[in-house]
Amino acid sequence: MVSFENCIDEKINQRVVALQQVFANNPFKGFIETVPAYASLAVFYDIGVVRKHHVISSTVFDCVKYFTEQLLQDLNDDLPVIKRPTITIPVYYNGADLALIAAQHQLSEEEVIQIHVSKTYRVFMVGFLPGFAYMGSVDELIATPRRLSPRITVPAGSVGVAGIQTGIYPMESPGGWQLLGQTPLKIFNKEKAHPCLLQAGDEVQFVSISKTTFENLYEY
Amino acid sequence: MSIKIIKPGMLTTLQGAARSGYRSMGIGGGGPMDNFAMRVANYLTGNEDEFAVIEMNFPAPEIIFLQDALISLTGADFSPVVNGAAVPLWTPLFVKKNSILQFRKPVNGAKAYLAVQGGWQAEKWLNSYSTHLKVAAGGYFGRALQKDDSIGFTQTGISFEQNKIFSWHISEIELDKIYRSPGHIRCIEGIEWKLLEDTSKAGFEKNDFVISDQSDRMGYRLNSQPLLLMQPTELISSPTDTGVVQLLPGGNCIILMADHQTTGGYPRIASVIKADLPKLAQARTGRVVNFTIVAQQTAEDALNQLEKTLREIKTACYLNF
């Protein structure tokens, strides 16, 4: 595990995603995969394969730590900026908590929607559920803490906020995020070789759509 | 060729080798809870490690074989009977067409495995036969088995004499290496171990932890004297792994098991060593678990030893056919 800092910060997450890229481009023998989070990267490896291909003076863990430190050094010198195309996600803003969020911040529902679509969001990480992208950061004007009691079912495609984070439920699930609306797009499709629409490092732009457009685009 | 499910049992699923390479998409490893028993079940029928097996809990399913089959049962002992006669675990078994397999009562363990020569026909999703219940993919239509389901198999690979009585089995000595002192689980310190109060650090190794009935394939919830952090700490979501011991806000712990989420926000105070996961998987609700913190070196040596045992069993099985 490579831990940077315990905070949600775009610069730090850029380093996490850059390190993920460096591992993907320079995998050591026995490397399996990395998992990026807000400010840390987990490195998974096959201990048997590492042991077979490398001279181990102490533990396999120390050996992998050494590889990681080498890669981190390269990272310090020249941070590769990974720029991916912005992904547009249509949302029908009819969420169950929209009125509540508006009231809490003394805004109209339309103002809440305008603030939510007014900027692009970075996908910091994918976790919790298959394909659930944690994005940020939401304008403080509409940032709202999680519901005190989570819902037993949140419909697939629901777009919500939790504090300064925003995210989309890829499938029906229990959940505590405050719901703004719903996207008609399948952001997780198990039939595809790459089932997730979003990955860490992506940029996302939400756009507000009408009920009719939502129904026309509905993929579920 | 196939079997038919007469009674489904509780959460009977098809599991192959764990899924690998998709954790960054939030798709965890999954796979069998007891990786050792699952792999040995495959070796006993001449299969490769990753072939699909049936994972069973108690109440276990009742199954009819519509063809002759070479099978094996490993893991938990639920008193298996074929046509009413007791059959042994950890050995190849020849089962005649129209035989009925039932399980009478749980004697020990929590997860039993049923393998068939050639493997059960299962859907491969993202390179694994394991059932992903949340996504409803892999295994048998991505779900637990139900009454009247038919699961196919193809007898290929090694040849064997029909009706043969198999006089060999996995020895107690080998099994003892994996499952001895069942309540004793070794851990390495977790990333947030340092955040624990000193008394809680000591308590982690001294206290009894009881596996609660709120435990499943995602995780084992433990009841114990509450453990405390030096100061309340909120973590942003971070990666997790099977065996990670998380400290919940109330002071109780949860151990992440096969179907755990790939990320989480609770402090990761310890990690169960990989070599002790089969033993933990076989621990039933209500069992008391005690933890010991060991060095990274010990954890790696133990895993190395486990893999060596598996290689030896695999070779011995193949030589016996």
Image (tube, coloured by chain):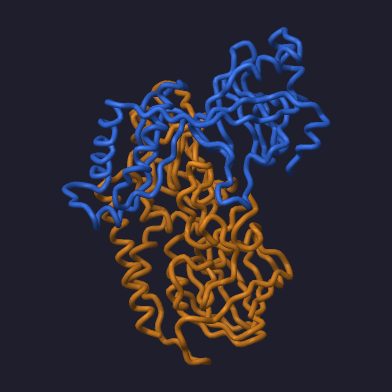
Chain colours: A blue, B orange
Vertical order, A99 against A131 (above or below): above
Residue at the spot 70% in from the left edge and 39% down from the top edge: A156
Q: Is residue A218 visible?
A: yes
Placement of B201 over or under A96, stated as above or below: below
**Quadrant that contains the N terminus of chain B:** bottom right
Task: Identify which residue is drawn at 60% across, 63% down.
Answer: B123
Left or right of B33, for residue B136: right
Residue B204 image point, x, y percent: 38, 38
> Visible in this render: residue A153?
no
Question: For residue A86, which quarter of the picture?
Answer: top right
Q: Nearer the viewer, residue B316 or A191?
A: A191
Please state the total of marks drawn on the protein image. 0
Q: Identify which residue, A20 or B166, lies in the foreground.
A: A20
Residue situated furthest right in the rendering: A212
Q: Indicate left or right for B45 with B302 as reference.
A: right
- Residue at the far top: name it: A106
- Using residue A14 as the reference point, say whether residue B198 is left or right of it: left
Which of the 4 image quarters holds residue B171? bottom left
Which quarter of the rendering shows the C terminus of chain B?
Answer: bottom left
Would residue B71 appear left or right of B308 to someone viewing this image? right
Q: Where does the image place residue B184, in percent across and percent down from the top left?
A: 38, 52
At 61% from the left and 23% from the top, the residue drawn is: A162
Compared with A141, B285 (above or below) is below
Residue farthest toward the left in the current orientation of the protein: A57
Picture coordinates of residue A108, whole percent (x, y)? 76, 11
- Taking depth in this image into account, of B110 and A186 the one nearest to the observer is A186
Given residues B145 and A50, the one toward you in this image is A50
A20 w.r.t. B319: above or below: above
